[in-house]
Amino acid sequence: MLFSDAIAGPAQTLVADLRDYPQWRQGRLRYGVWIVPVVDTELLEYIRVARDQLADLLHPSPRRQPHLTVFVCGFPGEGERDDDFPPQRLEQQAALLEAQADDACSLPLARLDSFASAAFIPVGDPMGRLAKWRSVLAQCSGEIRQSPYVAHITLGLYRRCVSAAELCRRLDDVAAPPSSLRASELHYVTYDARDQLGPLQCVRHVMLGEAQEPIRSAR
């Protein structure tokens, strides 16, 4: 649920409990996802400023690189659990992306929104490029997902409970982001599953082709 949904949105923020979850990990140490990394300096500076403005609400996350999650893969390695991600699937996904991912593009950004647990920058997909990448990745692997996919760049997880009205006021006070996220590479990254805000380690990357003109977002 999103706070922008005036009818079905959350009543208040949900405080994140930053700790290890051994029942989820079951002895496994890394977790893998495909992302679009944020590399544009203007957008990175916007994220820094927005986090500063919301610092009293958000857990600090200086080690987690800003990114758009494209596809959640699971725990790397051979295994029989539903959320295990064998290395041959990664190779298949990378090969499919290299053959079908097409050109680089710009994905439009909108004003801040929020899940119950995290504030974020919404990312649009008017040309269906993000949908295509997800479809390509799903050809050889099911995505590990408990809720519908919402394209976004996370600003931070909440460390304080505030009402929907207060949060919406705070988000409205933050300026709109730059017009778009530049997507020129797709990265498969992993992170320490014991550390929810730990750094991302790039394992594979797929370069996209020639750039297209930026897409302007509606304000």
Image (cartoon, rainbow, N blue to C red):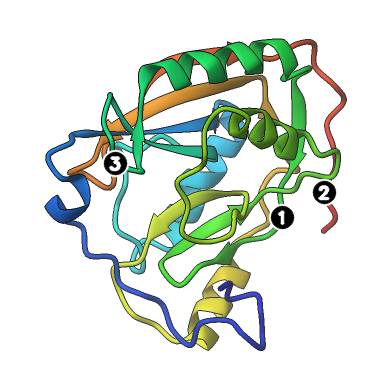
With respect to residue 36, does 198 lie above or below?
below
Distance (Cα) linking label 2 and label 1: 7 Å
Q: Nearer the viewer, mark 2 or mark 3?
A: 3
Q: Disc 3 marks which amino acid?
A: Arg
With respect to residue 2, does 107 lie above or below?
above
Q: Residue at x 39, y 82 (%)?
A: 162
With respect to residue 146, does 203 lie above or below?
above
**Quarter occupied by residue 29:** top left
Distance (Cα) linking label 2 and label 3: 41 Å
Residue labelled with disc 2: 217
Q: Which mark is residue 81?
A: 3
What x and y, as percent, mark residue 23? Answer: 15, 55
With respect to residue 87, does 13 lie above or below?
below
Residue labelled with disc 1: 110
One can see residue 174 in this view:
yes
Between 100 and 45, the residue placed more toward the observer is 100
Disc 2 and disc 1 in contact, CB within 8 angstroms: yes
Between 1 and 47, the residue placed more toward the observer is 1
**Quarter occupied by residue 128:** top right
**Quarter occupied by residue 174:** bottom right
In terms of sequence position, does the residue under pointer 2 or pointer 3 come before the other?
A: 3
Q: Disc 1 marks which amino acid?
A: Ala
Q: Residue at x 45, y 14 (%)?
A: 204
